[in-house]
Amino acid sequence: MENTENQMLIIFGASGDLTARKLIPAIYNLYKGNHLPENYVVLGASRSDWSDADFRKNVVEESKYLEDELKNVDNEFISEFCNKLFYHPLKEDYSCLKNRIEKLNNEYGTDNNFIFYFSVPPSIYESLAKNIYEQDLSKEGIGWKRLIVEKPFGYSLETARNLNHALHKYFKEPQIFRIDHYLGKETVQNLLVTRFANSIFEPLWNRNYIHHVEVTNAESVGVEKRGGYYDKSGALRDMFQNHLLQIVSLIIMEPPIGSNAEEIRNEKVKALKSLRIMKDDKTLHDHTIRAQYVSSIIDGKHVKGYREEDGVESNSTTETYAAIKFFVDNWRWADVPFYVRTAKRMPTKVTEVVIHFKTPHHQIFKESDIGNNDNKLVIRIQPDEGILIKFGVKVPGQGFNVERANLDFYYSSLVDTYVMTAYERLLLDAMQGDATLYARADEVEAAWEFVDPILNYWKNSDSKVYGYSAGVWGPENADDLIEGVAMWRNPSANLADDPGFCVLK
């Protein structure tokens, strides 16, 4: 196990939802699993006028997010954990914050190693970084200093560049950890192992054997209480630009020369730069589809349409469904189409990668499963995490009829292995200085370079926004995108239950 040095985590925006919902539960589980160093302190900071006791009560003792975890835990253990948590109400003068950090550092022996976590809107990243810098808190020398920032990282290529430039005035690039919780998921990381550690896949991972690649990210819920934010963002910015292009980069990247952070991230940047940018209106029209969910009846209950949601404009053209077809301009992936879709109000919640292999050039056996006879490698990211291989077997009896069979692995079968949550893994990596699963500045900008022309086309052209009933697999014309090549795999909630469609119950 990697060594985790003594350190302090300073969370800005500590009274917000993310701290109680994700960060503190992750830190608690790391503490319970003995992953934290002997001298470890969390200092929450925000505008709320809380005390240390208030912070501990709100994020641990009375937190609904830790309620189940703490049910059968000894009170002394909970108190020991809470004694590592402190709080500082932020004022205009950051010298008070500096004094509190120095006092805790000296009292608890955190060796001047600080992680600053920005759980705040990106609009205040620069001013916050400046205040930290002006208090000499970001300068390295005695101890290391790191900065973790949340998505969204930019609203466009221009804003992402501006944000990078702003942070680079106060922190060096190796100090900055841009978090994408999707990369903390075991099944996403397993893409690299599946590819590069298995000789049954690695030689086949190219245009000679792969027909097309399909990535689906579906959510059964709508925008919930995020209507105001979502209406300014949309599916392409919210999911595709960051989470899904990160997954794509792991699928298409070349083998790194080693497994350290920079070697892997170098290849991911090359991969994103090899995406064929769509520049002309015809290509953008033919290869992109956007849509919104409209009201429907699901399980006998009325479900609102997107434009009826709180915080959403009544004439909004923001997409809740986006499907993109694109190509990769390099030797490995030449002429292999990629189909990526993300949406809300789908029949089920599921994220998966499907590698469709080419069929044999000459078919000598009769397929029982007409139209679905290619070999598939399905990597299920959530839920029912695992890997599924679909291949042909002989139907028992006379003749040589063939049907599809499944060979599968489930993470749930690892009963004696604790699988960390995404935030546990990512926080621990940052504590240990491992940036492998964090995005670099040029990586973020390369993703925006691909997405920007699509967003600009949707904004400035007369491209249509289609409708789809809440609870179905998107607009009918979404099939046009993949028609002639294959059909969408509309997965069920369970990895191996693959009837070609998903039922709502």
Image: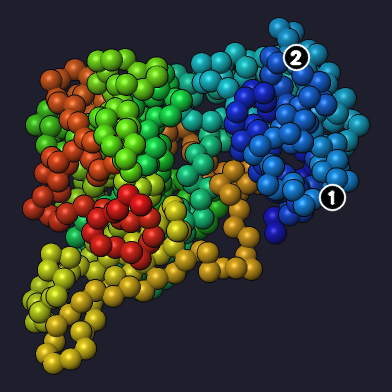
> Is residue 430 at all visible to an observer of this figure?
no
Residue 74 tag number: 1
> Looking at the image, is 312 positioned above or below residue 332?
above
Residue 480 in picture, x, y percent from top left:
11, 44
- Nearer the camera: disc 2 or disc 1: 1
In x, y percent, where is residue 352? Answer: 36, 53
Estimate how packed mark 2 is, as few (under 14), some (14 to 19) or many (20 or more) residues with alpha carbons within 10 Å: some
Question: Which residue shows up at 77% across the image and 52% down it?
Answer: 72
Numbered marks: total: 2
Horizontal arrangement in the rendering, residue 146 relative to residue 336 (left or right): right
User: As drawn, is 363 to the left or to the right of 257?
Assistant: left
Q: What residue type is labelled 2?
A: Asp
Residue drawn at x 21%, y 24% as measured from the top left: 458
Q: Tell me if 46 is positioned left or right of 341 in this view.
A: right
Name which of mark 2 and mark 1 comes first in the sequence.
Answer: 2
Q: Please determine whether, in this image, residue 451 is positioned above or below residue 473.
A: above
